[in-house]
Image (cartoon, rainbow, N blue to C red):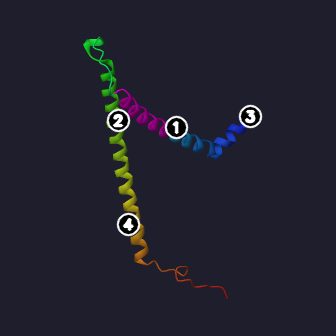
Amino acid sequence: MCRETMSVSANGTGKRSAVRLMALAACVLFTAAMFLSSFYILTHADHTHDHDGLGGGCATCIRIQAAESLLKQLSTAVVTVAVIFGGLFGIFFSLKTCASLSGFLTLVTLKIRLNN
């Protein structure tokens, strides 16, 4: 059993699948946090105020403010990542277009066969 584990990790497929699983888990947790925060805000928006909490504040209002703060932070992160990846995609696309227009002439691109 120990040898099987070593062969899988030495091959690299075990690490690759673990990284993919962690990335999937992070995406699921990120989506769940955004969805549940929005759901909490929508369901408790019209609540009765309970001013008997700590410092005389309404506990539900405090939780709604925390959920709104979480949504603001997460949406800022999403916009930042979208702008970065969009910019990188634009740069790579323009480089690919420029490389194809510069006309690297090889025998393969000219479709010349060299067999006799």
Contact check, label 4 and label 3, Cβ < 8 Å:
no
Residue drawn at 57 percent across, 85 percent down: 112
* Residue type highlighted by circle 4: Ser
- Count of labels in the image: 4
Sequence-wise, the earlier of marks 2 and 4 is 2
Which secondary structure lies at badge 1? helix
- Residue 71's disc is 2
Q: Main secondary structure of the magenta part?
A: helix
Q: CA distance from mark 2 to mark 4?
A: 34 Å
Residue 106, position as x, y percentages in the image: 51, 80
Residue furthest out toward the top: 52
Which quarter of the image is occupied by the N terminus?
top right
Mark nearer the viewer, 4 or 3: 4
Callout 1 crowding tier (Cα within 10 Å): few <14, some 14–19, many ≥20: few
Q: Which residue is mark 1?
A: 25
Q: CA distance from mark 1 to mark 4?
A: 33 Å
Mark nearer the viewer, 1 or 3: 1
Q: Which residue is mark 3?
A: 1
Figure check: 32 above or below 51:
below
Q: CA distance from mark 2 to mark 1?
A: 19 Å
Q: Which residues are magenta?
A: 26-44
Q: CA distance from mark 1 to mark 3?
A: 27 Å
Callout 4 crowding tier (Cα within 10 Å): few <14, some 14–19, many ≥20: few
- Residue 94's disc is 4
Residue 29 inside the magenta-drawn segment: yes
Q: CA distance from mark 4 to mark 3?
A: 50 Å
* Residue type highlighted by circle 3: Met
* Residue type highlighted by circle 2: Leu
